[in-house]
Amino acid sequence: MTPRRSLVFPRPRILALPLEDLACAALFVFWAMQGAIPGIAPPQSHEMTGATYTTLSTFGGILSQAVADALLVFLVLRHPRLLLRRIAALPWAGLFALLAVASTAWSLDPLLTLRRSIPFALAGLFGLWFAARFPAARQFAILRLAVVAVALATNVIILAAPSIGLDHSPGHAADWQGVFTQKNACGRIMVLATAIILFADRITAKRLAALALFLFVLIMSGSRGAWIVEFAVLLLWLLLLAARRAGSRFRLVLGLAAPVVVALCAAAAVCLFPWLSRLLGRDATLSGRTPIWAQVAHFIAQRPLFGYGYDAFWRGMVGPSFQIDAAVHFIVEHAHNGFLEICLELGAAGLALFLLSYASAWRSLWRHWRTGNLAPIAFPLAILVLIALYDLDENTLLIYNGIFWPLYVAALATIANLDPRRVRVRTASEQQPALQEVS
């Protein structure tokens, strides 16, 4: 008699991932949403969503931040040697994070600075650990899982709770904000998501489907700034495709010509600014940004060296930020320029440390560009470009629970790890085979 076979159901592929990978993906989801969990933890700062603070939202925000920080510390402390071996390779980024914490000493609100600068520094440590812990294929698998999750969640919340999922700012009622703080944040993360797909090692059918999902959400966000940045990302991707197939002489010419073309485009944009603003449906003040920049420059001049303390300037009706609110006739949450924000919070010292880290990364990238070793530097290059573009009219780098700071540190660590002058220590995780595709 033939023995009776029991039914065996296949295990969902996402459940086959190691818990460590799922935990990392959860952290990236949290940072992609800037810690703003719809209905539980509205954003503590930086964006206006119209959410009403309740006991649940207040304690939910504190609890979610504490859980995220505890999970981060747990992951990092499981492999502390990875940090000790590589932290010296990023001196400028390390000093930048330390300056944010040290600014508690001269901050306008020392307790607030301390409470937010520590998660900021921890997120930087996580970025360094993430680049050291996982090989590139596994990093991409984790990041894809995170961005697919927030893109799908955005579609779900639009269908289930449009009052939460649609943008709350005047004139944008049809634009999607989804699980993010507002429509521009939604568009920004979708641009990042497309970069995660485009700058991976290869594009499969599943990744094309994910790319289509990201582009759809990006269009529905109505964020024209994100559309422009997405166009720049696509140009960069095409540039890298051409460089991979070209000889060393063509790469040299291309690498030297690209900054010149960018400078010419920037000059043309300044000259044609009135026409471009009308084309994009924006006024000549860039939706009120230019008056904010003028006011911010005035306050930077009053504390030029070390600024007002990390995340301590914008306090609504309290302190000098009220003068800016009164001058522009609406509440301002940040400088709407990442470089001005660095000067405002950490002064010229902070801007110098950031520029040193940024320039050092580009110098290392140039060596790989000339040798044609482009595959390992593609995504770090995209991160550097995205930060430069987005921080022209937004603040992405200094957000204490934002996603771009840990990704920036991870990009710097990846670039430093490729430096042939450094001895590369292979970790146990780098010797493991890459995970199977999950998205």
Image (cartoon, helix red, strand yellow):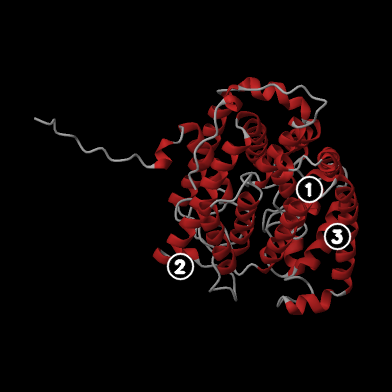
Q: Earlier in the sequence, mark 2 or mark 1?
A: 2
Q: Amino acid at mark 2?
A: Ser
Q: CA distance from mark 3 to mark 2?
A: 40 Å
Foreground label between 1 and 3: 3
Residue at 79% of width from left, 33% of height from top?
Answer: 95
Q: Secondary structure at mark 1?
A: helix
Q: Amino acid at mark 3?
A: Val
Image coords of residue 178 (percent x, y): 51, 61
Q: Earlier in the sequence, mark 3 or mark 2?
A: 2
Q: Would you say the residues marked 1 and 3 are in contact, meaning their CB atoms lie under 8 Å apart?
A: no
Image coords of residue 111 (percent x, y): 65, 39
Q: Quadrant of residue 92?
A: top right
Residue for badge 2: 163
Q: Secondary structure at mark 2?
A: helix
Q: Would you say the residues marked 2 and 1 are in contact, meaning their CB atoms lie under 8 Å apart?
A: no
Q: CA distance from mark 2 to mark 1?
A: 34 Å
Is 290 left or right of 70, judged from the image as shown? Answer: right
Q: Earlier in the sequence, mark 1 or mark 3?
A: 3
Image coords of residue 46 (percent x, y): 64, 55
10 Å crowding of disc 2: few (<14), some (14-19), many (20+): few
Question: Is residue 216 visible to us here?
Answer: yes
Q: Secondary structure at mark 3?
A: helix
Outermost residue toward the left in this view: 1
Residue at 18% of width from left, 34% of height from top?
Answer: 5
Image coords of residue 355 (percent x, y): 84, 43
Residue for badge 3: 262
Residue for badge 1: 342
Question: Is residue 66 visible to us here?
Answer: no
Q: Quadrant of residue 288?
A: bottom right
Name the one closer to the observer, 219 or 366.
366
- Up the image or down, 131 lies above or below 243; here it is above
